[in-house]
Image: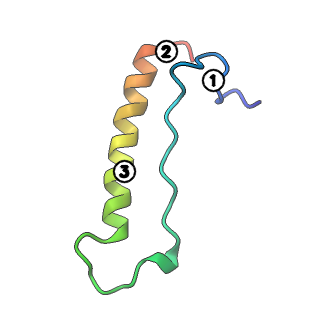
Amino acid sequence: MSPADTSVDFPDDPRPQPPPEPDPGECCGNGCDPCIYDLHGEAMERYRAALAAWRARHPGA
């Protein structure tokens, strides 16, 4: 178990996990709105906010 894995320490409040990166082949290159990379960026913003809130709840983790 890695030091970053605190799911054992906080089983009812596991550390948020980042969204998976899109595969390069998932983007069609046609300028879709929203693009898969736009959606990933939004998911990363939600992840960062969730991680900040989790760290506030678990300052020693």
The numbered disc on residue 58 is: 2
Q: How far apart are marks 2 and 3 (CA)?
A: 22 Å
Q: Which residue is drawn at 67% across and 20% down?
A: 8
Q: Where is residue 55 in the image (x, y as percent from the top left)?
A: 45, 22
Q: Which amino acid does label 3 sit on?
A: Ala
Q: Residues within 10 Å of mark 1 (few under 14, many from 20)?
A: some
Above or below: residue 8 compared with residue 34: above
Image quarter where the C terminus lies is top right
Residue sitting at 40 percent across and 17 percent down?
A: 56
Looking at numbered disc 2 in the image, what kind of residue is underneath it? His
- On the image, the x and y values in percent for residue 2 come to 73, 31
- Residue, far front: 12
Q: Between residues 43 and 59, which one lies in front from this camera angle?
A: 43
Against 52, residue 28 (above or below) is: below
Three-letter code for the amino acid on which mark 1 is drawn = Thr
Mark 3 lies on a secondary structure that is helix
Q: In this view, does 46 lie above or below 58?
A: below
Mark 3 or mark 1: whose residue is earlier in sequence: 1
Q: Is mark 2 on a helix, strand or loop?
A: loop
Badge 1 is on which residue? 6
Q: Does residue 46 appear left or right of residue 24 in this picture? A: left
Question: Mark 3 sits on what residue?
Answer: 43
**Cβ atoms at labels 2 and 1 below 8 Å apart:** yes
Among the 4 quarters of the image, the one containing residue 33 = bottom left
Where is residue 31? Give x, y as percent: 27, 82
Q: Distance between the residues labelled 2 and 1?
A: 10 Å
Which residue is located at x 53 percent, y 71 percent? 23
